[in-house]
Amino acid sequence: MARVTVEDCIERIPNRFELVLTAGQRARAIQKGELLTIDRDNDKNPVVALREIAAETIDRDKIQDAIVRGLQRLNEREEEVVADEAALEAKSEMDEFSSKYEADLYGENSGMQVGHSDDIDSTGFQDVDINLLNSDD
């Protein structure tokens, strides 16, 4: 059984905190059944994980991605659902906003008369009786 020390691993991962996180994640992955990259030599999972780190036989980026995924509050499917709900809520708010102000912007309250295109002259304007605009309805 080969002994592994922190000094062997610290050369590969200089940050001790990152080393502990990486070794712990790898040990949990081994416990779940992932294949070993070195011989076990009757060692426990944390020792095997440290030996793999020292021997550089594992993909550190893959392990770090697994750490991040494990710490995320939402998984990808939940993020899709939240995004869909946010889109529906935004659409609902926009519909409410546009219907609320549609009458004010394009209706009688705007001081304009809305008519058919046949009623409008070639300049694009329609003559409006000034008395209609000044009347208080």
Image (spheres, rainbow, N blue to C red):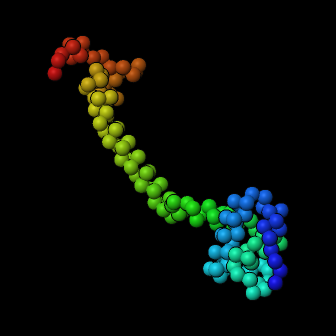
Single out the residue that lies furthest toward the bottom: 42
Give the percent coordinates (x, y) of residue 133.
24, 16
| Residue 106 locus on image (x, y percent) | 32, 29
Q: Which residue is at the front of the view, 27 or 86? A: 27
Q: Nearer the viewer, residue 101 or 11?
A: 11
Pick the front one: 80 or 63: 63
Residue 51 location, quadrant: bottom right
Left or right of 70? Residue 50 is right
In the picture, measured across the screen, residue 83 lies left or right of residue 5, that is left
Name, please, the residue furthest toward the left. 137
Question: Which corner quadrant holds the N terminus?
Answer: bottom right
Q: Is residue 57 visible?
A: no
The picture places residue 64, in percent across and down from the top left corner, at: 68, 63
Q: Is residue 132 visible?
A: yes
111 in relation to 46, above or below: above
Q: Residue 131: image x %, image y %?
A: 20, 13
Given residues 112 and 94, the one toward you in this image is 94
Looking at the image, residue 72 sits to the left or right of residue 24; the answer is left
Residue 129 image-quadrant placement? top left
Q: Residue at x 79, y 80 (%)?
A: 38
